[in-house]
Image: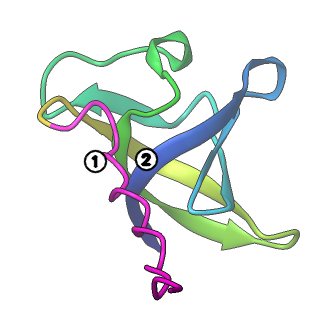
Amino acid sequence: MTIDGFIESIEETADRFVVFATTVQVTDSTEIDSDGENELEFDDFLVGMRVYVRGVQRPGDVVYADRVTIDNEASTPPPLPPPPLPASRPSTP
């Protein structure tokens, strides 16, 4: 299974983070890198980072990551679109 998205939350005490409402478990055997650069640590993850995850989904809807790559080009999610303009009301005489 692969996931491409932005880190929504991090649970540091359990070495887990959430991407697209999917919990990703990082283990001692998970490879963590940054676009092919040096291997990184779990502590290098930040909320809003774009990551590519490759792993295996196990019971409990948790993906156990074999590899996580941090995308240096997109470190924060794109901005939200502006809210819609209020509907205009017809003028009264």
Where does label 1 land, which residue? 78
The local secondary structure at tag 1 comes to loop
Q: Which mark is residue 6?
A: 2
Label 2: few (<14), some (14–19) or many (≥20) C-alpha neighbours in 10 Å: many
Q: Secondary structure at mark 2?
A: strand
Which quadrant holds residue 11?
Answer: top right
At 54% from the left and 50% from the top, the residue drawn is 65
Q: Main secondary structure of the magenta part?
A: loop
Q: Is residue 47 visible?
A: yes
Q: Position of residue 35 (x, y in %)?
A: 14, 34
Residue with the most extreme right position = 60
Q: Residue at x 46, y 83 (%)?
A: 91
Q: Amino acid at mark 1?
A: Pro
Residue 22, image x and y in percent?
66, 62
**In the image, residue 82 above or below residue 12:** below
Left or right, 20 with reference to 49: right
Q: Real-space Cα distance between discs 1 and 2? A: 10 Å
Q: Amino acid at mark 2?
A: Phe
Depth check, front residue: 25 or 87: 87
Residue 66, position as x, y percentages in the image: 47, 50
Q: Which residues are magenta?
A: 74-93
Q: Is residue 35 above or below residue 3?
A: above
The magenta stretch spans residue 36: no
Give left or right: position of 19 versus 58.
left
The residue at the point 54 percent across, 11 percent down is 43
Residue located at (78% from left, 70% from top)? 61
Q: Is residue 71 left or right of residue 15?
A: left
Q: Is residue 91 above or below residue 65?
A: below
